[in-house]
Image: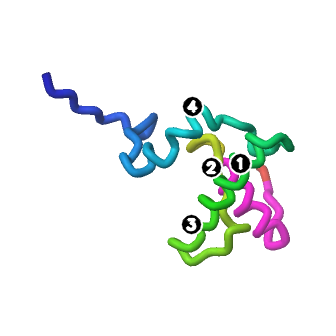
């Protein structure tokens, strides 16, 4: 039976190239990149390399690339960024 999946807003299949790149970090190389022990330092190195790759593809600086846990976190970060960037241009709101 063929399966047709139409809920890509909730989740989507990983690209095969991405999956192959990520497999070690979903298994034996699962260290916390914020930790100081060796497996964590290796994970941090790979996250930093991924950040550099993404930045290069979109012509950005690596420090401008943030990885989030999902769409909601990304949306909230974007909204806060816009609000912060425009905080001085804000006009008072009048409620009647």
C-alpha distance separating marks 3 and 2? 19 Å
- Lower sequence index among marks 2 and 4: 4
- Lower sequence index among marks 1 and 3: 1
C-alpha distance separating marks 4 and 1? 14 Å
C-alpha distance separating marks 2 and 4? 25 Å
Task: Identify which residue is drawn at 79% across, 63% down.
Answer: 84
- Lower sequence index among marks 3 and 4: 4
Q: Secondary structure at mark 4?
A: loop
Where is residue 13? Give x, y as percent.
38, 39
Residue nearest the observer in this picture, 62 or 78: 62
Task: Identify which residue is drawn at 44% across, 36% down.
Answer: 11
Residue position for label 4: 27
Residue 85 belongs to the span the image colors magenta: yes
C-alpha distance separating marks 1 and 3? 17 Å
Instruction: Tell me where the magenta segment starts and ends, as one range.
Output: 74-94
- Lower sequence index among marks 4 and 1: 4
> Which mark identifies residue 74?
2
Q: Secondary structure at mark 3?
A: helix
For the residue carrying disc 3, how many other residues have a C-alpha within 10 Å: few (<14), some (14-19), or many (20+)?
A: some
Where is residue 76? Give x, y as percent.
67, 48
Task: Place residue 59 in its image quadrant.
Answer: bottom right
Residue nearest the observer in this picture, 63 or 79: 63
- Lower sequence index among marks 2 and 1: 1
């Amino acid at each position: 039976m063929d399966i047709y999946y139409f809920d890509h807003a909730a989740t989507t299949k990983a690209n095969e190239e991405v999956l192959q790149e990520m497999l070690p970090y979903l298994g034996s190389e699962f260290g916390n990149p914020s930790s100081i022990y060796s497996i964590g330092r290796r994970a941090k190195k790979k996250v930093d390399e991924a950040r550099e790759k993404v930045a290069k593809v979109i012509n950005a600086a690596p420090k401008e690339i943030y990885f989030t846990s999902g769409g909601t976190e990304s949306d909230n970060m974007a909204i806060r960024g816009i609000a912060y960037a425009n905080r001085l241009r804000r006009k008072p709101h009048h409620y009647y």
